Structure formats: C-alpha cells, structure tokens
Image (tube, helix red, strand yellow):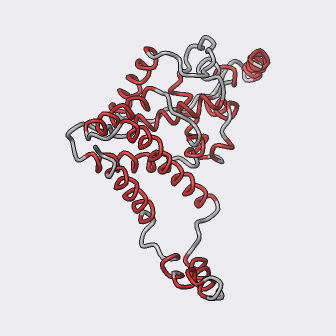
Amino acid sequence: MFVQDEARDRHEDAAHGGKRRSVAAGDEPAGARARRGRAAADEAELPPPPRRRPRRPARRGLSAEAIVDAAFAVLDEGGGVDALNMRAVADRLGTGPASLYAHFAGKDELLAAMIDRIAGELPLAEVGKAPWQEQLKDAIRAIRAGLGAHHDLARASLGSIPTGPNALRWVDALLGVLRDAGLPDRVIAYAVDILPLYATATAYEESLYRAHEQPDEDYIGELRRYYQALPPERFPNLVALAVPLTTTETEYDRFEFGLDALVRGIETMAR
C-alpha cells in the first residue's frame, strides 16, 4: 500500500508542477507550543505502546503536529470521524497520503494522537490543591468538554486505552490525588476507568444530538403527553413520573447528577 501511495504522490507532484499547497498555521499560544514540544520529547523517551506498528522515515517539512492540526480541521469542518481518513488529511496539507505514514501507521494511530492532543489541554490534578472529590469531578468535566468540542471525536475514544504521553501524565497526576486520599488501589483503578468512560459516553451522545438535531421542546412536550396518556393500570409508574421524566433544568443537570452519584459512591469506599 505504501509503494502505491508513494507512486501516486509522485504523479500528483508532477501534475502540479512540483508545487503543493500547505495549510497555513494560525497564531498559537506559547503555552500550547510548549506543551506540544514537551509531549513530543516525552514520547521519544517512552517505550512503544502495545500494538503500535513501526514507522517509516519521515519526510522533511511535515511534522506530526501539522498532521494532527490538519486532522482536527477535517474532523471539525467535515463529517466527523467517518469523514476523517489519511487522504482527506493529506489533501488538507497539500501532499499525498504516503507522506503521512512516516508519522502514523493509519487512521487509528492518527485518532489516538488527536485524543492525546486533547489530553494535553486538560488541567492536571495536584495533591493538596483542592479536595480530591472536587479535583476528580473537575477532571471528568474537562474530558467531556474537551471531547465535546470536536464533533464526534468521543466516538473514537470509546473502547480504547489512551497511551500517549499527555494522557499518561494526566492519569498519573489523578492517580496521585486518589492515592493520597487513601482510596483502595482497586477502587482507584476502577474510578479512573469508569469515570472517563462516563464523560466520553456523554460527549458522544451529545454529538449524536447535534448531528440529528437535539429533541426540541415541542417533541419533549409530545413525549410527556404520551406518557400521561398511557394506560395507568399497565404503566402506573411512567404515568406518575411523566413530568419528572421529561423535565431537565439545563443541559448539564443530568451529567452533574451522574457525576455526583459516582463520586459519592467512590467516597464511601475510602479506607
């Protein structure tokens, strides 16, 4: 596949007179550049993650960061994860797909890098900075917000275990706060698995609402009247709770309720 892609790239170069259009990078805060540089250095020092294929030598002038930038543009401006592929990203960069494989073996690795970019933007927990319960909640809120800001990227995060340097730094800091709180090791392990899953699933559900138009007040009103019209002898509880089941004060109420319930449950398991 790589050989075919490279041949196609050379043909496209010739067709364009050897010139290709590149994406112009916008101004970027110094802090963000520093985080990216640190992540790149950290990744170079880490062992290869499980099931990561070896990379081919990179071509000059094209960085992994530029590829990830272009991938986010394709994701956010196009049709989400389904529209994201190596050719679309290469087109955005004004190059051929073969040049991307020096940095990423395929779409899955590219998505993993995008998720790690999000992880690098999350605030780090810190022992003694605030009560562990609040730090845990803030960490999970940040995941939901970070993934929710980029189309349906949360979908790609479901069923995967982040192993990028930013994700490792983020989870290690959170583990430190939970260990300092005296929670049992097994409880901590489940907490840093289930709570991010809760945030990710919520972000993905919200992306589905955005794609298919979130149910409006008219539909919710119709649903409420439908519940109320059900035969009470067959569905007594649905009829009785028709109003609460179809009432939400803000879009964050349900998420905050679930988050509070989960953290309170974890709190009861402290030593």
Q: Quadrant of the N terminus?
A: top right
Which residue is painted at 63% across and 31% down in the image?
108
Which residue is painted at 33% across and 32% down in the image?
31
Relative placement, left or right, of 148 versus 129 is: right
Which residue is painted at 63% across and 13% down in the image?
56
Relative placement, left or right, of 269 versus 217 is: left
Q: Nearer the viewer, residue 108 or 162?
A: 162
Relative placement, left or right, of 205 versus 134 is: right
Q: Residue 202 appears at what percent x and percent y? A: 51, 54
Q: Residue 58 appears at what percent x and percent y? A: 59, 14
Outermost residue to the top: 57
Relative placement, left or right, of 21 versus 174 is: right
Q: Nearer the viewer, residue 50 or 217?
A: 50
Q: Nearer the viewer, residue 239 or 146?
A: 239
Outermost residue to the front: 271
Q: Quadrant of residue 40?
A: top left
